[in-house]
Image (tube, helix red, strand yellow):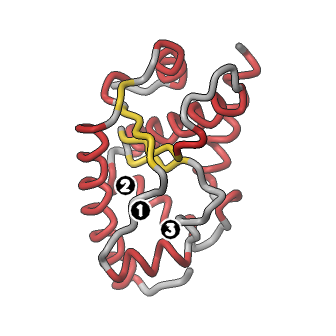
Amino acid sequence: MRINPQQFEQLLSAAVKWVAEQEAIVLEKGGALNKTELDYARRIGIVYPEKVRLLKVPSFPIPTEPILKMAMESLEVQSSNIVGLTLRYAVFIKEDWWRQQNSRKQLEFVVHELVHTHQYERLGGIEPYLRQYLTERQIFSYPNNPLEVEACQIATNILIKN
């Protein structure tokens, strides 16, 4: 997805508003991390792990703002193979991936999402994170986006050390 600087700023502004709205919903309705997840959040370096909330959903929320709908479609954010969506301290998880018993793959997935929370903190919040993520997505495909690569590497490394 290539857009001009003015379009990018419009997209970013709409995305920041939408992420903040969705995060508020999850913070109100979601559940806290369990002990294992909280331990991993601390190991990752999340400053405020107690703020993180997980919400089980049948599907992800879809923005109504036309510029966001277009951007999400072009970035394949609503792709059926995506099972988690992290919006700072809010993590949407598709119901079929919800805290599966004894599933190392599911734990790796949650740790991956928690790395995104850490990235939001490290980069300075919603706007700086989205600025970097959206800029990188104009250059790299989803699995090759540097923030995604980092999340995969950290999740794998943390679980190997366990």
Q: How many marks?
A: 3
The picture places residue 49, in percent across and down from the top left corner, at: 38, 24
User: Dividing the picture into quarters, in which one does residue 18 lie?
Assistant: bottom left
User: Dividing the picture into quarters, in which one does residue 124 lie?
Assistant: top left
Which is nearer the N-term, disc 3 or disc 2?
Answer: 2
Q: Please, what secondary structure does the residue beneath circle 3 have? A: helix
Tell me the crowding category of disc 1: few under 14, some 14 to 19, or many 20 or more residues within 10 angstroms, Cα based. Answer: some
Q: Please, what secondary structure does the residue beneath circle 2 have? A: helix
Tell me the crowding category of disc 3: few under 14, some 14 to 19, or many 20 or more residues within 10 angstroms, Cα based. Answer: some
Q: Nearer the viewer, residue 89 or 59?
A: 59
Residue 2 lies left or right of residue 105; in this view the side is: left
Report, in whole angstroms, how far the alpha carbon at label 3 lies from the one at label 2.
Answer: 11 Å
Residue bearing the label numbered 2? 128
- Specify the quadrant that holds the N terminus: bottom right
Using the image, determine if residue 137 lies above or below residue 148: below
- Specify the quadrant that holds the C terminus: top right
The picture places residue 35, in percent across and down from the top left corner, at: 47, 12
The picture places residue 10, in percent across and down from the top left corner, at: 30, 78
Dot label at residue 131: 1
Q: Residue at x 33, y 51 (%)?
A: 126
Using the image, determine if residue 47 lies above or below residue 2: above
**Mark 1 touches mark 3? (CB < 8 Å):** yes
Tell me the crowding category of disc 2: few under 14, some 14 to 19, or many 20 or more residues within 10 angstroms, Cα based. Answer: some
Question: Looking at numbered disc 1 in the image, what kind of residue is underneath it?
Answer: Arg
The picture places residue 109, in percent across and down from the top left corner, at: 62, 37
**Mark 2 touches mark 1? (CB < 8 Å):** yes
Residue bearing the label numbered 3? 135
Residue 39 lies left or right of residue 126; in this view the side is: right
Question: Looking at numbered disc 3 in the image, what kind of residue is underneath it?
Answer: Thr
